[in-house]
Amino acid sequence: MLGIWATSCSRPPALIGLVNRTTCSQRTLVFKPRTSLVKQFQAHRPYTTPPTPTPTPKSNNASILSRVLPFRGGSQNTSSLRKIVALAKPETKPLLAAIGLLLASSAVSMTVPFTIGKLIDFFSTNNPQIPFGLSTWEASALLLLLFTAGAAANAGRAMIMRLAGQRIVARLREKTYSAALKQEVEFVERGEGDVLSRLSVDTSIVGESVTQNLSDGLRAVVMSSVGLGAMFYVSPTLTVLMLAVVPPVSLGAVFYGRYLKKLSNKTQEAVGEMTKVATESLSALRTVQAFNAVPQEQQKFHDRVDKILVLARKEAIASGIFFGSTGWSGNITLLALLGYGGTLVSHGTISVGDLTSLLLYTVYVGSGLQMLTSFFSSIMRGIGAGMRVFEVIDRTPAIPDDSGLAVPPDRRGVVRFEGINFEYPSRKGVEILKDFNLEMAVGESIAIVGESGGGKSSIHSLLLRYYDPVKGKVTFDGQDIREFSATSWRSIIGVVPQDPVLFTGTIATNIAFGNPDATREQIESAAREANCEFIWGMPKGFDTEIGRLSLSGGQRQRLAIARALLKNPVILALDEATSSLDATSERRVNDAIDKILRSRQTTCLFVAHRLSTIARAERIVVLEGGRITESGTYRELVTDENSRFRALMAAQLNAAAGESLYIDRVSEVTPTDN
Ligand SMILES: Nc1ncnc2c1ncn2[C@@H]1O[C@H](COP(=O)(O)OP(=O)(O)OP(=O)(O)O)[C@@H](O)[C@H]1O
């Protein structure tokens, strides 16, 4: 009886979560861009997400629910529950159909114990009577039809529910993904949003809780209530005897459920730690192998896996005790029922068939109660997962991308950084830029130089509105760029990052990234302008898959330049890779830059490290202590013996080679217009 339902119980929810999380972590390894991963794990400073406003419950029902549900953060629970229910709204029709089918199939299965009882009585009496005056064949055919209809209804219910669940998950994933893509980079890149696991694991849990759980929960309610009613009908005394076992088992289930939830949370955390270790070392496999740190990394991973095992052991012991004791108490009740029921049969109070029906109904009620227990724990998990998912969906990005004015694509204007103070949200109090001022005329090219970590790339981040300044403003044509919609503002800027990311796809789709409507001609022309001649040398040319290529730093940079040029940008932000390129690559990149400077009216802001690039800019500004300390043409700064620029470049060049090498190199460079 109880033993039967206990052993038939599926894997505890916590374990399901564990498996899913592991799968998700594997996905993380595949899809996460390397740079952001490394940044995520190298960042030791905690980043606090802006608090999500806690919605207040609107209806009385909601506040009642919040008191009933044993979960922290009542109003968030109810709001999450409400949103989960709202998600199921488009599926109302299929869900209603499934509920109808569920009731039909449950009604059929509830007749099984009754039918078996009647069959036993039928075969054990001398003069059997079939109800409604049916013949044996007719009764058999009717039963066969009934059970077939029940099975068909059950199959239909399962299919409809599963499909509806998957559609809900799909919608939820898309909503979460588009909400995540609109967040400011800080939220996603620093991993605080934990977007990937919300996207894969939490959305599935929510989908399960609306469909599978709803279906199981309803079935459980039908099974236990109808079963109980039938039992009272057959024998009230025996029913009361059987019910004696319910309170202790329910109490045990509550304690077990809570313990399981606690363990499950700890397990999720431990799995998260394990994933972090694996992601870190796998994304830096070259370093791990170069330093022969494989055993060290294995040990780290082993420690995390061990932690999960310890928790799994606790969970195994708890579930063993719970299911063992419920099974034991169930079987004892069964014995008591059999003993007492047997006496009633021998006294002729009830028939053998009635006793059998009663025992079978007891099993149904038991299964129903068991299902209700897991139904509630799954609902709890669904609500918890929903809270995590809706946190992303409902989050207002710090820099909204679609509100604000549109910038006409042909608008030209002066770009000004005016009295900017800037610090990263994760490093409050550490000022990267202090009263930073810079004016860029239309079509002017400026190279920013300065010490590593001085804030050069941060200027690009402000220009692109990945962040907003704490004080001051960036203006374009006299207008604060915060007045523009971020999407529209970014559409006129071409970006060449330090470490360009190439996406899965062909060379052509990568150059056309963000410009899916670009023609092949436009793509080829941008590639030509960016000196990407290597593409024509490939057997499949522009249709070569990126995944199969191992491109050099210079090639990647030129592809990124082509990608930026295809946008026909008004402003070009180029962040030069710190690592040096080989002489040919450097020349090809510089030639491409030259072409842009000569042929376009594009305002260019270079974060430059190489002398050969720096020399190409019309103006060089030196960034020190968060502000510009020097500005001038290359020749002006290089010929001024006391210039900060000279000192900086000298320090950056090989110190061992000394001043002479520096001077040699300086004299090798032939600036364009300076
Ligand atoms: N997202 C971030 N959150 C917190 N701090 C950051 C972030 N990005 C950069 N920093 C820090 O801000 C400072 C300036 O960084 P930035 O990348 O702008 O310097 P940089 O001059 O471009 O350096 P490099 O020449 O080495 O590329 C550094 O101390 C860096 O560690």
Image (cartoon, helix red, strand yellow):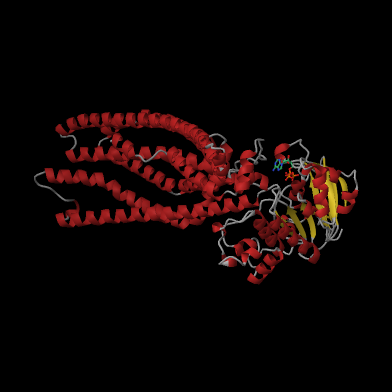
The residue shown at (55%, 57%) is 547
Q: How many marks?
A: 0
* Residue 408: percent from left, percent from top: 77, 64
> Where does the C terminus fall, quadrant-wise?
bottom right
Residue 82 visible in this rendered orientation of the protein: no
Q: Is residue 538 visible?
A: yes
The front one of 642 and 568 is 642
Q: Nearer the viewer, residue 56 or 638?
A: 638
- Compared across the picture, whether 205 is left or right of 517 comes to left
* Residue 379 sits above or below residue 528 on the image: above
In which quadrant of this rendering is ligand 1 seen?
top right
**Seen in the image, is 412 located left or right of residue 561?**
right
Q: Which residue of the protein is positioned furthest toward the bottom in this rendering? A: 521
Q: Position of residue 27 (x, y in %)?
A: 51, 48
Q: Quadrant of the N terminus?
A: top left
| Residue furthest left as drawn | 126
Q: Residue shown at 81%/55% (left/top)?
A: 669
- Asked whether, in this view, residue 190 is left or right of residue 427, the answer is left
- Image coordinates for residue 130, horizontal then vertical, percent: 16, 51
Residue 520 point in image, percent of width and height: 63, 70
